Image: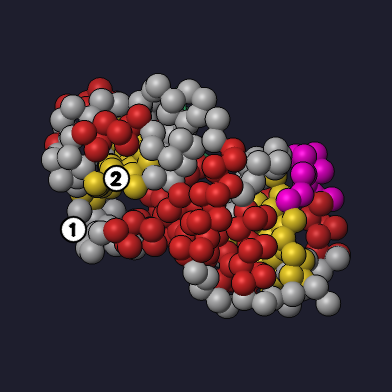
Amino acid sequence: MKKLYAVIGDPIGHSMSPAMHNDLFQHYKIDAHYHALHVKSEQLEDAIKGLKAIGISGFNVTIPHKVKIISLLDRVDSLALSIGAVNTVVNEDGQLVGYNTDGSGYLTGIRNELSSLEDKKVLIIGAGGAARAIYFSMADAGIKQIDLTNRTVNKALSLIHDCPYAVQSEALELNETEKQLIEYDIVIQTTSIGMSPERDYIPLSLHNLKTNAFVSDIIYNPLETLFLQNAKEKGASIQNGISMFVHQGALAFQKWTGILPDLDRMKNIVLKQLGGNIC
Ligand code: ATR
């Protein structure tokens, strides 16, 4: 019987996950289909019961359900629990088990670009859900110094306070960060600033950026944010948000099927999708 996979969220119409996963199922000759399901917050509990009842094999979870779903699952792994968000669910012998592949996906992507991370000094801009997943995964991976900067500095402080892994961290005001930017080898932009259609904004000035820094932005629409353009002008290496998106999807696919899929193939599908959707 055809296996069933899905992504649930609200809104869900523009999700690129169905195209990406259905292409992989076809490519690896797996008899399965991945659907985009529009689930509103007030329907989440019923939707999860329904998905379990029909024996769904696995699903992704996107905005706004990544936090609320935790209490509705049979089990949640420890990293996802400490992050406080689930983006991937696997049906393990009838039990719905939650994981977070956002942070680990980000980490896999950056490891492909940089040989050693552990001795690097990292700055994360933002303190929302995405920053949390990336920060916890990098701390769990043994990166020693990860500072956080955010418009609301108290949110950065809470994130540091909540992290169960040993890591040296400071919470900084944005203007303070601009002055000491030269200290950082890796700068990771996790806010929505610069996302289409509001492309003309940056979260902070890169005037003092280290010349050979590595700068990444988790936004993929546009493919090159103004922030990344500024980083490139300062001589930095850059990485856009396609990497995190594709790697979180690849790790989900691997949990569902045991196959680590072809990343270039996934990237091409996403770029094709974006070609039609960039505004
Ligand atoms: P996500 O789950 O995608 O990370 P989020 O939890 O809403 O989204 O977090 C958004 C992040 O972008 C936060 O760090 C937010 O800063 P605040 O904590 O101060 O709200 C940041 N952000 C969003 N819009 C911003 C803006 N106009 N200026 C500065 N920071 C902004």
Instruction: Find residue 182 and report its image quarter.
Output: top left
User: Is 115 placed left or right of 220 in the picture?
Assistant: left
Q: Which residue is mark 1?
A: 119
State the separation of the CA atoms marked 2 and 1. 19 Å
| Range drawn in magenta | 36-46
Q: How is the image coloured?
A: secondary structure
Report the residue marked by disc 2: 238
Residue 57: give x, y in percent of width and height: 73, 69
Which is in the foreground here, disc 2 or disc 1? 2
Q: Position of residue 140 (x, y in %)?
A: 37, 61
Q: Quadrant of residue 173?
A: top left
Residue 95: percent from the left, percent from the top? Answer: 73, 70
**Helix, strand or loop under label 1:** loop
The kind of residue tagged 1 is Asp
Does the beta carbon of the residue at mark 1 sit less than 8 Å from ligand 1?
no
Q: Is residue 64 visible?
A: yes
Q: Position of residue 150 (x, y in %)?
A: 36, 30
Q: Residue at x 55, y 49 (%)?
A: 272
Specify the quadrant that holds the N terminus.
Answer: bottom right
